[in-house]
Amino acid sequence: MSRKTCTRCKHEQPLSGFQAAKSRKDGLQPHCRQCQRDYYLTTRERRLSLAHENYEHNRERKKKYAREYAPKWAAENRPKRNESEARRRARKLSGGKTESLQHIYDDVPVIELLLGEPCHVDHKHPLSRGGTHEPDNLQIIPARLNLAKGAKLDFDCSSYA
Ligand SMILES: [Zn+2]
């Protein structure tokens, strides 16, 4: 059999007029290439609008997710986020001079061992209030104090130092 009849347009055509289809008994699509092309074109609009709807739906879903979960996540991860925010601000302010301050950060695990609790490198005068990222303005304090202190200017850590 060197010819095959398209089940859609009913035209008998050479086998080359059909696309291969492994799962088919004869290894060919039941519709000829031309019919496949027609089908593709007539359904194009519908597929496009479906894809668009899907996109819109997903976008809404993502937005909803962000609205509902982002604040919760932020609240749960505030300590971590504050710390990385502070470091980011510090890097920006110091213009990449943080290398010379690395020893202060290296001391953190030592202090943590001594105090037996997590510690942060704190800016005595908060960066957000114009404090600098210089050794003079840095101190290692327990994380809980750092969090309690936040951006307060008059928080006294000296009694814990
Ligand atoms: Zn056909």
Image (cartoon, grey):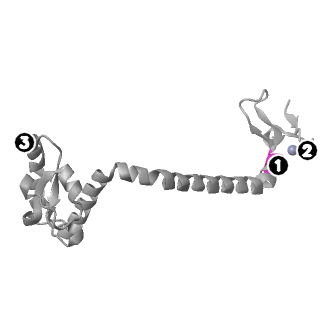
- Mark 3 or 2: in front is 3
Q: Which residue is mark 2?
A: 9
Q: Quadrant of residue 71?
A: bottom left
Query: Can residue 161 be seen from the camera position used here?
Result: no
Q: Residue at x 8, y 52 (%)?
A: 160
Does mark 2's beta carbon lie closer than 8 Å to ligand 1? yes
Q: Amino acid at mark 2?
A: Cys
Q: How many marks?
A: 3
Label 3 within 8 A of ligand 1 by Cβ? no
Q: Give the percent coordinates (x, y) of residue 100.
A: 9, 61
Q: Which residues are magenta?
A: 33-37
Mark 2 vs 1: CB contact within 8 A = yes
Which circle marks residue 34 in the picture?
1
Is 5 displayed left or right of 44 in the figure? right
Q: Earlier in the sequence, mark 2 or mark 1?
A: 2
Question: What secondary structure is marked by label 2?
Answer: loop
Looking at the rendered structure, which numbered label has been put on residue 147? none
Callout 3 touching callout 2 (CB < 8 Å): no
In the rendered structure, the answer to whether residue 67 lies left or right of residue 10 reads left
Write down the residue under mark 3.
114
**Residue under the image location 28 percent in, 60 percent down:** 85
